[in-house]
Structure formats: structure tokens, C-alpha cells
Amino acid sequence: MQHGKYRFIVGFLVVPLALYALFVIWPFIQSIYYSLTDWSGLSPEFGFVGLDNYTRLLDDEIFWKSLQHSLTFAVVLPLVTVGFALFLAFMLNVGGRRRKGAAVTGVRGSSFYKIVYFFPQVLSIVIVALLFQFAYNPNSGAINSFLRAVGLGSVQPDWLGDPDLALICVMIVLVWSTVGFFVVLFSAGMASIPRDFYEAALLDGANRFTTFFRITLPLLWDTVQSGWIYMGILALGAESFAVVQIMTVGPSGGGPDYSTIVMPLYVYQKAFRDGQAAYATTIGVALLLVTLAFAAVVMKLGRRERLEF
Amino acid sequence: MKTTDIPPADDERIPALRTDRVPVVRKTAAPADTKREGTVLNVFSHGVLIIWAIMVVLPLLWAVMTSFKTDRAIFTSPWSLPDALHFENWSRAWTQAHMSDYFLNTVLVVGGSLVGTLLFGSMAAYVLARFEFPGNRFLYFLFIGGMSFPIILALVPLFYVMQNMALLNTIHGLILVYIAYSLPFTVFFLTAFFRTLPTSVAEAAFIDGASHTRTFFQVMLPMAKPGLISVGIFNFLGQWNQYLLPTVLNTDPDQKVLSQGLVQLAVSQGYKGDWSGLFAGLVMAMLPVLAAYVVFQRQVVAGLTAGAVK
């Protein structure tokens, strides 16, 4: 298979590689360079300023807020989402009524549940964010009028308008929209665990909770870990940008008193609202470091012996 | 759990399960006890699962219901059923609020970029999976490295790259960017897929005198159909729902895609107080995707979860 091989390889690679290099790789490299300049983005002229942008970062209160919120997202969201999804998936696959000849069975209608849980995953995050923004509306929103209807008229939080609550409200939306994906993912993994393992364990007197921690979780560990990283990258990146930008408008963007600002949104604001493109790329480089550190920590903490079955 | 206290005499227990707190059930006592435990668990499972199902469906049903109500009813009684089906909300959203334009733009952009993504993604993946050449590994990692980098970092310079090339605020510019940003996952997924295909078929075609190019298009691509469908669904949903890229690179009101259009709608209808029109727009955007999902449920789930498992 040697004839014309290199011509073929080059011919097939040139277009994809050119597109990828021009629109992805080159901007990445440029942005790291721009972070060392005072480029405004508005005029083509700029000068080299060394690490000035990075020292400015250290004194920028809003940057620290955005970092803090993004880190909260990266820690809390995977924990809650993956944990809750594991719980639901376990209920789906092991919570069934005992049937003849099977130690563990899925609940009746488990495929129906999986279809429904997956709904938010196929919807645009924009639709989800707009729906919840309206539900959170303090006066006419669905949540507060529900509270009034059940006699809790005195409890009428301002939700997205309350600096203490806004971030939690945003996180709930991200959990709501992603849990179903992980339920389906973990269910598929659980279905591939041989039934005999459960049978043996149950015969030996383990209860279902023990089987979860001693059998299900260890055998599912690889999937859980990649789900964890996937959710973390999502929480640090485009998804959190969309939800925060759409839901918490606020006078300056990012919620009342920057109470929901996240790093990707801050990059966007600095570059396209304030005309400080160089400084925006500096924040972006910080976000890149946070993302890489997150992935490294999860890999390190999650390292286990691989179980073959 | 009620159990006998007599420990079993057999040695078949899994060592990992040997805990003192767990009472040991003898084989003969097992059915009655686990049955009761099973029933309690079953009721509990169903309870939890149903509650979450309601939490998922309720906001969506609420949106559909709200889209048929008058603005007054939306504000005064958010939970009541509409007094009549106000279909005029829908026609207002479709024509006056430009939902039809947003749909058209999205179909053009996603149509173009999906074809391009699958074509260029499979070409690159095939070469990287099946041919040995210097730099193969480097290019592979260059492609898949793009999956974990925060896109927003590249978007600031990319905006000016696009501006200089006169691609900003154009449909074809957006298509090229969508393709470029979809390549990392597509190449990653399809490279793994091409590796699993048997080599003998391609060799046979080659011996029969087909060129490399012809072998790829007439033999390998048809064989890779299941992989193309999975990655195609993944990219379709990702590109259809894309928000970050068009928000930065496509700010011309006439060119807006659906996701931007909905945000635009929320802002403009907010000023006008036309909330029923906004909900009609939201439901309009929501229903086709949900309907398509329910019909192609199996393929969609396979396509979206395939990436995370590998």
C-alpha cells in the first residue's frame, strides 16, 4: 500500500489541518502572546508590557471573585451532579422488585425514566437558562407563586437578585440540565456489570448499600472519573458562560455586585465590552491553568488499579 | 434486616465483603428477608425516580402551557391553565419576532458545518488511524488537545482574525469556525473507530486497483457509518445549541442563529412586555429537538454518551 501514500496523506490532511490551525491553534498561541502586551483590541497598535497584566490580575478584586466562583463550580457541580446521578442510576438498576431467578433487577419502567431524564441534555442551554430565569422571577415567577399558593407567602426570596442566593440558583440550573446525561451514562456502565457479582454478594449477606460501595462503584470507577472531568470542564467553560450571561443580567453583568461572575464571562466582558483585549487574554490564560490543574488533580486523586471484568 | 446469627460454614464469601456490621444471611433464610428489603427499596426507588421525573418535565410542560396564555394571565396566575389556546402568540413569535429567520440561519449554518465536520473529520481521522508517517502522533495529540482547552481564550484573537479576513458576521465564516472547533472530538472519536475496522477489506480494494482516495470513499466510509452517525448526532446537537461562538463572532442582527435569537427575543419582548410571544418562541425552539430526540432516542443516547465512555 505504498503507492502514492504521502501524496494521499498530505491531500487528506491539508484542509482539516489548515482550518484547525487557523481558527483554533493560531488564536490560542496569539492569545498567550497578547497577554504580555497592552493591546486594546480597538486599534492595531500595541506595545510589549511583560508581566504587567499578570500583576494587575493579582490586585483585581473582580478577577478573584470570578476565580472563586469558577473554582466553586468546578468542585461543587461535579460532586453534586455525579453523586446524584450515581444515586438515581443505582435506584434505576438495582431498585427493582425481586423477580424469580435474579438477584438484582432494574425498576419497572426504567427506560421511560431514562428517556425523560435525558430531555434537558438535548435542549440548548439557552432555552434552559431563559426558562429558569422566568421561574426565578421574584414577583410573577413560578417558584414564588408556588410558595404563595402553598401558604409560604412570607418566604419570597429575590433569587437571582439576591447576591447570596444568585450563585446557588445558577448552579441548580446547571445540575438540572446535566444530571440526566450522567444517569444514562452510569446506567449503561452498571448494566454491563455481571449479575453474578451481585448474586454472590447478596447471598453472602451484603445489603444493597454495601453492594453499591463494594461492587458498583469500584467497577464503574473509570466512567465516574471521566464523567467528573467532563462535568468540571463544562462548569469552567462555555456552559457556565451561557447560564451566567443569560440569567444574571444585573447592571454590570454577572449578577448583583458581581455575585455570579465566572472567569469565561469576565474574559468576554473585558474583551468585547471594555476594550481591554490584552487583559482579557490574561484572564483567559489563568482560566486555562485552572482547567489543566483541575484535570490533573482529578486524574491524580482518581488513580486506582484498573479492574477487568 | 432480620437474620439468623449462625455464621455460614462455607468459605465462598468474597473477602472484600467480610464486614462485622453486615449480618450474614444463610442461604435458606434468604428469600423471605431480602424480599421485604426489596419491597421497601422498590417503593423508595420509585418515589425518588418519579419525583425527579416530575422535576424534569414540569418546567417544560409549564413553558408549553404558558406559551398559550395572555400576558396578563402569565403575570397574575403563573400556574393556572390558559383560558383559551392563544395561538396568536405563536404566529406573532414566528413572524414579528423573527423566529423564522433565526431558524433559517441556524439550518444553514448547522447544515453546512455538519457536512464539513463529518467530511474533514473523517478524512483526518482515517489518515491518522491507518497510516504510519513521521509526525502522526504529534498531529493526533494536537487535534485532541483542543478538547480540554477553554474556547473563550482563543475567541479574543479569533475575533480579530475573522475581522481581518472579512469573515466576521457571515454565515460561511461561522460554518468554518464551527467545523474547526468540532474537529477535536470528531477526530478523537473517529480515529478510535477507524482503528477497530478490519484492514483486510481496504487491502483487498487496494489490490483490486482502487486508489487510496477511492478506497476511502467507497469502502471505508460506508463501513464507518455507525461511527459517523454517533459523532454526527453529537455534533448536530452541539452545533444546533451552540451559544458562545455565535455570541462573539456573529453579532449582526440579521444573521443571528436560534440560540442568540432567543436571548435577543427575551431582551426585546421584555421591553415590550410580550412574554407570551417569548414563551411561544422558546417552545417553538424546544419542541422539534425534543420530538427528534424521542423518535431517535436510542441513537441520540448512544451518540452523546459514546464520547464520555471512551
Image (spheres, rainbow, N blue to C red):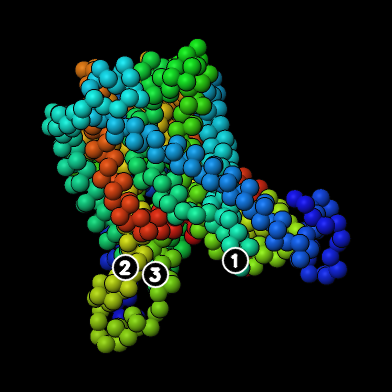
Query: Please, which residue is most extreme toward the left here?
Result: B95
Residue designated by label 2: B225
Q: CA distance from mark 1 to mark 2?
A: 40 Å
The amino acid sitting under disc 3 is Phe
Q: Which chain does tag 2 point to?
A: B
Q: Where is residue A184 drawn, in percent x and y?
A: 47, 52
Q: Which chain does tag 3 point to?
A: B
Side of A107 relative to B157 (left or right): right
- Looking at the image, do the residues carrying marks 1 and 2 touch, with CB atoms under 8 Å apart? no
Residue designated by label 3: B194
The amino acid sitting under disc 1 is Lys
Same chain for the residues under marks 3 and 1 in the image: no
Q: Which residue is drawn at the image coordinates 32% and 56% (left, top)? A: B296
Q: Where is residue B197 drawn, in percent x and y?
A: 40, 74
Q: Which residue is drawn at the image coordinates 30% and 27% (left, top)? A: B81
- Dot 2 falls on a residue whose secondary structure is helix
Q: Where is residue B135 drawn, in percent x and y?
A: 43, 64
The amino acid sitting under disc 2 is Lys
